[in-house]
Image: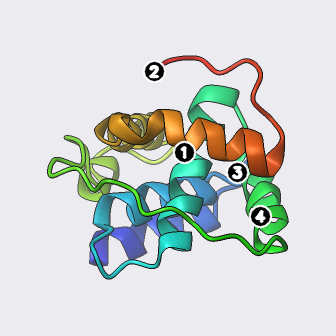
Amino acid sequence: MEQYYELSYYTLAHPDPQFIHQHIVDAFAAETANRQTKRISLAFALIGLCLYLEKSYTGKQVQAAHQALANRKKDWPRFELPEDRGDITAADVLSKPEGAERDEMICAWCTSVWRAYRNNHIEIRHLIANVIGDSEGFERR
């Protein structure tokens, strides 16, 4: 958890206006989810990862999508929790020097976590299409 907080400090202070902090929030939420995690929390994390990695949403765009979703009352589905959550962690991201290398590692971390949830990808894409209305142009990663 300490590494996540340190990484949060880095991303919140990051000068890039695309707001990469949102991506680490989503990766960490999906990576650490358990049976007690609120369904909405995991849904938002997986939606955020999908929009970032498959639709090239910036962190600001993902945050706006989350805000739009929060305004809609929805019975959020329960997602399958994979045993393996990927092979990259916040500590791995922090091991890279600040700047482009660390930012690229954030993307790699998000990709690693998103791939771990591959059994939920179709359901997440349908959820995005039904709730946000954005289903075109999905890439498979």
For this rendering, which residue is in front, 124 or 27? Answer: 124
Mark sitting on residue 69: 4
* Other residues around mark 1 within 10 Å, as few (<14) / some (14–19) / many (≥20): many
Indicate the position of residue 37 as horizontal and vertical percent values: 38, 77
3 vs 2, front mark? 2
3 vs 1, front mark? 1
- Distance, label 3 to label 2, CA atoms, is 19 Å
Is residue 85 visible in this depiction of the protein?
Answer: yes
Instruction: Provide the residue designation for mark 2.
Output: 141
Instruction: Provide the residue designation for mark 3.
Output: 59
- Distance, label 3 to label 1, CA atoms, is 10 Å
For this rendering, which residue is in front, 101 or 111? Answer: 111
3 vs 4, front mark? 4
Helix or strand or loop: what does disc 2 sit on?
loop
Instruction: Provide the residue designation for mark 1.
Output: 49
- Distance, label 4 to label 2, CA atoms, is 24 Å
Q: Earlier in the sequence, mark 3 or mark 4?
A: 3
* Other residues around mark 3 within 10 Å, as few (<14) / some (14–19) / many (≥20): many
4 vs 2, front mark? 4
Classify residue 58 as left or right of residue 34: right
Which amino acid is tagged 1?
Leu
Helix or strand or loop: what does disc 3 sit on?
helix
Classify residue 84 as left or right of residue 56: left
